[in-house]
Amino acid sequence: MSPNALPARPRLAAHVLARRHLVGEEERIILHDLRTGELLQLGPREWGLLSAADGTRDVEGIVIAAAREGAPARVPAAQAFFAQLHAAGLLGAEDAGEDAAPSASAALAAPALPARDPRERPLEVLPDFSLHCDGSGSCCRIYASILFDPEEAARARALRPEVLSGGARHERAFTPDRGTWPCAASVVAMRDGRCAYLEGEGGAARCSLHAAGGPEAKPLGCRTFPASFIDDGESIRISVSVECACVLASVGRPGGAPLVDPRLRARGDLDERLDVAALPDSAEVAPGAAAPRAELVAWSRRLAAATPPPDVAAGLFSLAAAVEAEGLTGDAVARFERPDPLDPSALGPWLAALHRRAARRARGDAAWRSERDLARRATQWIAAATFALADPDLLAALLLSPPRAPDRERFYLRAALHGHRLLGALPLSLALRDRAARLVVARALPLICAEAGADGDPACAEPIALVEAVLRGHGLDAYAADMARAS
C-alpha cells in the first residue's frame, strides 16, 4: 500500500488523544496530536464515525456501525473525512501496536531497568511530609486526562449512573486513553474543564465518587495523587508532585495523611498497577556530557543535604553554570549555597520562550474551552505573567525583592530532588534553569491573578503548584525543549 493511501481499515493513531469536553451543554471532542502539539475539534457526528474506526472495519463497515449509534453518514463523505485525518497524520497503521506512542515515564526509563523491578528494593519516602487535602477539587479541574481502568470505570458508572447518562453506556462518559480501539484505560469526559464526577463550586467542590462510595471508589491515580514513584537503582523513591495547592499548604504541618501506607516496606508491597518510573543508566548533566546513574543519585543526595540559599531560583541558576563548567564534582553545590544574583538578561530568554508557548496555547484554548475552564484561565495568567516580565525594569525589581514564600520554594526543590524530577529529557543544567524560571513566574503570578479577579480561587493560593500543573498537564513544559534546541 502506498504510504499516502488511506488505510483499508482506518483507526486513530496511538499518538492522538481523543478527549470529550462539555462546554456548557455543547459537546466537543478534541483530538490532541502528541507529536505536533496541534488540536483538532470534532462534533458528535464526526466522533461517531471515528469511534467506530477501531482498525477492524473498512469505511463501509464504519458507516454501518456509526449509523447504529446514531451518527449516520454517506460513504463518500466518510471517505473524505478519513482522508483529511490521514493527510494530517492522525490515522495509525492497521496493526494497532505499530505506532504506539511511549508514555512520559517510558521515555524517562529508556534504557530501562529490567521489566520487573526487584521486589525487595526498599521504599524511601520523602521525609517530614504528610498531606492535608482540603477537598476543594483544584486538581480535578486542571488536568487534561483522568484515567480509569475498566473496573474503576464500571464502578463509577454504577455509583453515579446519571453522570453524562453513562450508567449503561461506557462511551457516553469515557473515551479511550489512546486511539479508538479498546485499551487498558479510559479517560472521563470533562465539563467546563472539570472531571465530570466533580460536584460543587470553589471551596465546596467535592468528588461525587468519594461521596457515594468512599475513597476506594476513586481511580487509583486519584487515590495515590500527588505521590510519585521512581526506581533509582538503589530504592523506590516516593516523593510528591508539587502540582496541587494542598501540597504546599501542607508544608510544615504534621498530622496529615502519609504518601503511602507506612506498613509498606518494599517494591513488592506496592500495588502492581502503580506507574513506577525508572532512572536511565546514564543521563546528560550538560549538553554533550553524561554521567552514570549512581553518580547522579549521589549528587542529588548531596544537593538535598545542602543549605538552600534565601533565593532558590538564584541558587539553581548558579548551580547550572557550575555543573556545565565542572560537572558533578568540584564546588558546584557550594555555588548553589552561595549563588550569584539572578541576571535578568540570562533569565529573559527562558521567560520569553515560555511566553510564546503559553500565548499560543491560550489562543488555541479560547477557540473551544469554556471561560470557566481553569486550564484556559491559568494558561492565560501564565502568558500574562511572562509578558509582564519581558519588561526589564519589572523583572529586575522582582528579582531584587525577597521571595514571598521561601519555605515553599525550598520544599519545591526538596521534593524534586527526592523524586529525581530534575533528571529526564533535558540535560541537568538546563533542567535547573527551567526550574528557576518557573519559580520566577510563580512569584509574578499573584499580581496577575489579582488583576483577573481570581485571587479567591483555591488554585491560586499556591502559585508554584499552579505553574507546575499547567506546564506538565498542558504541555507548556515543552518551552524548555525549545531552549535546549536553541542552545
Image (cartoon, rainbow, N blue to C red):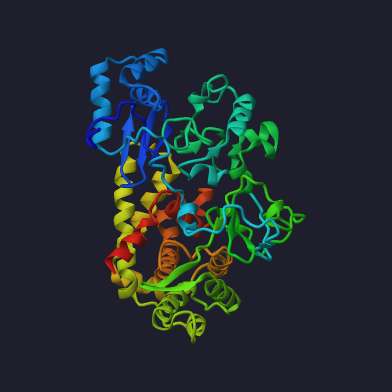
Task: Look at 57% across and 50% down and name the residue there.
Answer: 275
Q: In front: 231, or 433? A: 231
Q: In front: 28, or 430? A: 430
Q: Residue furthest bottom?
A: 330
Reply above or below: 466 against 290.
above
Q: Is residue 233 left or right of residue 12?
A: right
Where, by quadrant of the figure, is residue 418 drawn? bottom right
Tell me residue 337's x, y (percent): 52, 82
Reply above or below: 62 against 121.
above
Tell me residue 107's x, y (percent): 45, 55
Tell me residue 368's x, y (percent): 34, 36
Q: In front: 14, or 346? A: 14
Tell me residue 83's x, y (percent): 24, 29
Where, by quadrant of the figure, is residue 217 drawn? top right
Say whether residue 95 is visible: yes
User: Which quadrant is the N terminus positioned in?
Assistant: top left
Reply above or below: 46 against 33.
above
User: Which quadrant is the C terminus positioned in?
Assistant: bottom left
Task: Look at 61% across and 33% down and name the residue there.
Answer: 152
